[in-house]
Image (tube, rainbow, N blue to C red):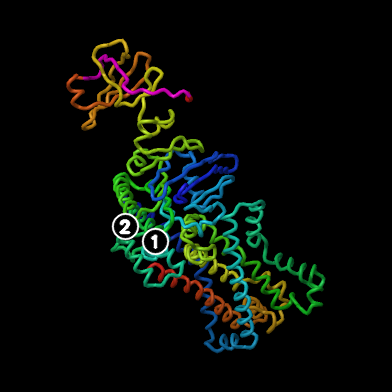
Amino acid sequence: MSDGNGIAVEGVEKRFGTFEALKGVSLTVPNGSLTALLGPSGSGKSTLLRVIAGLEQPDAGRVLIAGQEVTGVTPQKRGVGFVFQHYAAFKHMTVERNVGFGLRIRKRPKAEVAAKVEELLGLVHLKGFAHRYPSELSGGQRQRMALARALAVEPEVLLLDEPFGALDATVRKELRTWLRRLHEDVNVTTIFVTHDQEEAMDVAEQIVVMNDGRIEQVGSPRDLYEQPANEFVMGFVGEVNQLGDGLVRPHDIEILLEPDGTTQEGQIERVAHLGFEVRVELVLDDGRRLAVQTTRQDAEERELESGQIVYLRPDRERRFADTA
Amino acid sequence: MRGDESRLQRYGLRFVALGYLAALLVVPVTIIFFRTFEEGLGPPLEAITSADGQHAFWLTLICVGIAVPLNTIFGVLAALVLVRQRFRGKAVLNTIVDLPFAISPVVIGLALLLVYGRNGWVGQDLLDAGIQVIFSTPGMVLATVFVSLPFVVRETMPVLQEIGNEQEQAASTLGASAWQTFWRVTLPAIRWGVAYGVVLATARALGEYGAVSVVAGRISGQTETLPLFVENEFTNFNLAGAYAAAIVLALLALVVLFGMNLLKRREART
C-alpha cells in the first residue's frame, strides 16, 4: 500500500499436503474498504482469509497489515477481528462475557469493559440478551454476538469467513444489509468470504474473484459484471449464454420475430413469469439451450409463447481469447 | 390392542434391565450391609477404628490422592496431543494409553517388580540411593497410577473432538495466549469429560487390588490399603472387619459419584 494502510498480500503460496490451496496470490485492500473474496468452494478464498488472520502460515509470500509486515506474527498479536461461519461462540459464557473476552484478556478495568460491552450490544441489537447463553440465541443473534466480540478489541481489520453461510435465506438478507450499515458506522477495513455472487455484489465495494488458488479479477461489482476479465469471471458473477462463439448475458439478447441476417433461429421452450421480469428458455437449431430475460411488457406485446420460432440477436456479446 | 402390546414391551424391557441390576449388583451389596451390622455396631466399628484399619484407610487416600491428580494432568495433556496434533507414532501412543485396560492388574504388579524390585532393572540403584519402591508406598502409588491411567484420556478425547478448535482459534484472534486459551476456553468446554474421567479413575484407584497386592508385600499396618485390608480380615475369619472396611470403601466411591452429580446439577441450573 502506498499510504501504508489497509492490507497487502504479496506472492502468498499455501499447500496442504499435495493440494495447492494458494498459488501465488497478491492483493491490496484499501484502508476502510469493504471487500468480498468470491469464488467456488476449493478456490482458496477461506485459506487466503486465514493466512491474513495468521490462522494459517503461508509457505511463501508476505502479509502486511497497516504497513507492518505480520507474516510470522501469531493471530494473538495481529490485531485482527475474525468471525467464523459457525460462530465459534464460547458456549460456557454469557453473551456479555463472550463480547468482553478480548478486553478482559487485555486486563482492562471492569467499568471500561462493561461500558464497551454495552455499547457493542447496542450496535448489534442484542441489548436485552447480555445474560443469555449462546445456546439460547438464534443463529443470526449468535453471529451478531460473534461480530460484537470481534469488534470489541478495536481490530485493525475485520475478517469474516462465510459469515452468513449457516443462516437461512431471510436472516441472510437482513444481515447483509445490516453488515453494510455497520461498516459505514465503524469503518474498519473489512474482508468477507462468500461463494454467493449476489451477496458479494450486494454488500461489497470491491470484489476479488478467486478460482483454483488464484485471483481472477479484482474490481467493483459493476466492473466485474460489465467488464469481466475472462470467461470464468463472466460465468461466476452472473448468468451467461453461449451464442455463436461469444458469451452473452440473458438480458443482452434481443428477441426478434423476423430474421435479419445477423440473427440466430431458436424455438421457445418455456416462458416463465418472475414478476417484473420474464425468463424465456429457448433451444437453438444446433440443440444448445439458452435463456433470455426480458420485461413482462415486452413479452406480452410480442405474444411470446412456447413452441414459437423466434430470431435472436446478441446485444453485447464477448469473446475471451485465452479461454476454452 | 397395540397400546397393550407396547406397554407390555415397555414393562418387559424395564423388568429385564432392573432385574439384571438387582440380581447382579444391588443384592450382593445390600447383603454386605446387613451382614456388617448383624451383631450390632460394635464389631465393625472396632475393626475400622483399629490401628491397621485406620492405616489402611489413610494409605488408600494417599495412593488415590497422588495417582488421580497425576493422571488428570497427564490425561488432559495426552488427550490434547492425541486430538489436536499430528505426528508419527500417534496410533501407537493411542494404543499404549489403553494398555492398563488390556493387561491383568497382577501382570502390571509383576512388571513393576521387574523394574523396581531388588533384582529389578533399577531397583538396586534406587535402594542404594535410599529409595525403597517395592514393599512400600511409592510402589503402591505407581501401581495405582498405572491401573487408573486411561480414564481421563479416554473421557476427554471425544469431548475435545466434538468441540473442535474454532473456539480456541477465536480466542487467539482476540488476543489470548495459548495458556489463557487453555484455562478460559478449552478447559471449561471439556470439564465434564474430565470430571467423569476423574470419577472413574478415582473409583478404580480406590478399589485396586491385584497390582497393588503384588508390589505391597502386605505388611499389616504398613503396606495395606483398604482392599488388601478387607481381604486380610476375611482370610483371618474376621468377617465383621472385612465387611465394615468394604462398606467404608463403597461409601468413599459413593461420595465421589454423588459429588459429581451435585456439580452437574449446579451446572445445569446456570
Q: What residue occupies the far front of the structure in this picture?
A: A2
**Amino acid type indicated by mark 2:** Val
Q: Chain of mark 1?
A: A
Work out whether mark 1 precedes mark 2 in sequence or the reverse, and give the earlier one.
2
Query: What label sits on residue A124 in the rendered view?
Result: 2
Q: Position of residue A183 (x, y in %)?
A: 34, 51
Label 1 amino acid? Ala
- Give whichever of A233, B15 is nearer the camera: A233
Give the x, y percent position of residue A129. Answer: 31, 63
Q: Secondary structure at mark 1?
A: helix
In-front residue for pair B47/B34:
B47
Task: Report if residue B224 lies within the magenta region.
Answer: no
- Mark 2: secondary structure: loop
**Residue tagged by mark 1?**
A152
Determine whether, in the image, residue B33 is placed left or right of residue A146. Answer: right
Label 1 neighbour load within 10 Å: few <14, some 14-19, many 20+: many
Q: Nearer the viewer, residue A160 or B223?
A: A160
Q: Determine which of the numbered discs, if any, sits on residue A316 in the image.
A: none
Report x, y in % for residue B9.
39, 54
Residue B242 visible to the viewer = yes
Question: What's the distance in space between the residues labelled 1 and 2, CA to CA?
Answer: 12 Å
Residue that appears at 60% across and 58% down: B81
The reply, left or right, for residue A302 in relation to residue A233 is left
Magenta stretch in the rendered image: A304-321
